Amino acid sequence: MPHVRSIPWFSLLALSCAWSCGTAGGDPQTPPYTDEPAFQGEVDAGGATTAPTPVDIDPSPPPPVSELDATPAEVGAGEGESADSSVPFPACAATTQKAQPVPVDVYFVLDASGSMSDLVAAQKSKWSAVVAAMTDLVGDPRSIGMNVGLELFPRLQAGVPATCTSNADCGAAGPCFLGVCNDASGLPCADNSDCDGASACVPVGTCELDPNQLCNPGGDCGVDGNGFDLGGCQSLPTSSCADGDSCSPSDYSTPDVPIGALPGASTAFLAALSGHSPQGGTPTLAALSAGLETARQNAIAHPDHLVTVVLATDGVPDETGDGRSSACTGVDLATANAAVTQAVSAAFAGSPGIRTFALGVFTPDSEAMGDSVLEAIAAAGGTSQPYIVTTSGTDSGPDGVETQLVAALDQIRGDSLPCRFGVPVPQTGTADFGRVNVRVTSAGATSTVAYVEAGAACGPAGGWYYDADPAEGGVPRFIELCAATCGEVESDPSASVDLALGCATTLP
């Protein structure tokens, strides 16, 4: 009579608690370990059993099955939970590996329009404050390893010269902005032919300490609305074409500084900033659309990187394209803001998704309007709230513009850098995202951090979550720590984060 040999329970154990086993439910149920000898027998086809034969076995658990490169197995303190609590089982065996921080790429889309020349302190403009804060960021040792790139806007349409002395220089992008019509329109002009018959073109100059302010050549500019001295009024031997800005995203597709690693990338980054002077309008839609696409292509080329865009601006979108050429047309704020927000939202929802931070530098008269625009952009870009810097009449102390900018950029860096880690990928098989645990070692103690499913579920107790929820069909790329847990890691220079693989994820 044929015999069927039974499978000893301890050989089944090797199939449980494996990171890549692809189990859908809880831990496989296995009998408890015991110090008593186990027995195995044979069962014939009629159900009769032969006499069991004692077999001595090692009572210690077998090594875990893992297809990942990991440190030697360690036994978790009861991690995981049996589907049937009436059946006892041993502590789950897990493999651990050091969590690897995710490389971070930050692409700055920086407003360099004429209003960036406005003063925020005596003889200090918004632009000089931004350049100083950016210099601080890329030179900070804490930024080493971060990858940065830069796109400045506005840019000129193809064929439009950087300077002009007559309308002939500008062509369709004219007139050359040498004066204004002395009527209610205040339109730019080069000569009387650019104004209607009842008005004339009056030459204008720019203020010595704020080139964004127009004035009567040869006079004194006085002070601005914040009481800052504007210096004397300088005539304009050359100027710029009034309609020279480009509103075509293709004209912004080449970065001023390609994304590269710090500290090496700082040289080109700072050279681009120092060699630029604010000028022109604010074609945010074209510039940001191109910046988001540059970031997306970078994310495709580097799927293990976390890629973000930072829009830094001092104004609301005031130029957009007509779809027929690269020239800009004026547009109402609601329409421009809706178009920008839609572009940011589409980038965040894309694959790979690109987050957008919004950083605003506003004077008191534009702050309320600017806040609402950047709030919509930040919400659409997955970063919740914008960072707002306000002019306060001083550049020193906690309210100084430069100080605020440094703090805002530091927060953006902190939100991007320290608490995101790569999701381990098995060499073969299917990843089981329900069998990952995060362990934090701080102040000499190790604790397992609870999984909270989404960033919105984070609370004072901390936790961790995936950037895409696997329970809703998402495929995670990153493990992210909640703010409370991140703060614990940041506050302890000796802290470490490890991933324990193979046991059911610990929940709150």
Image (cartoon, rainbow, N blue to C red):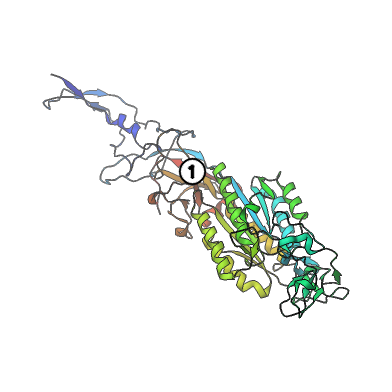
The correct choice, above or below, for 8 with respect to 343 in the image is: above
Seen from the viewer's position, the closer of residues 131 and 12 is 131
- Total label count? 1
Residue 322 shown left or right of residue 507 in the figure: right
- Look at the image and tell me in which quarter the C terminus lies: bottom left
Q: Residue lying at the far right in this picture: please name it.
A: 218
Viewer-nearest residue: 20 or 289: 289
Residue at the image point whose x is 63% and y is 50% from the top: 253
Residue at far top of view:
1
Residue 83: x %, y % from top left? 29, 45
Pointer 1: residues within 10 angstroms few (<14), some, or many (20+)? many
Q: Is residue 478 left or right of residue 263?
A: left
Quadrant in the picture for residue 360: bottom right
Residue 401 horizontal/vertical position (percent): 71, 66
Q: Is residue 365 left or right of residue 165?
A: left
Picture residue at 77% right of the left edge, 72% below the top: 193
491 versus 166 height, above or below: above
Q: SS for tag 1?
A: loop
Q: Which residue is mark 1?
A: 423
Between residue 75 and residue 508, name the one nearer to us.
508
Check the picture and name the quadrant holding the N terminus. top left
Does residue 35 appear in the picture of this structure? no
Residue 283 is at least partly visible in this image: yes
Direction from residue 117 to residue 27 in the image, left or right: left
Amino acid type indicated by mark 1:
Val
Image quarter of residue 226: bottom right
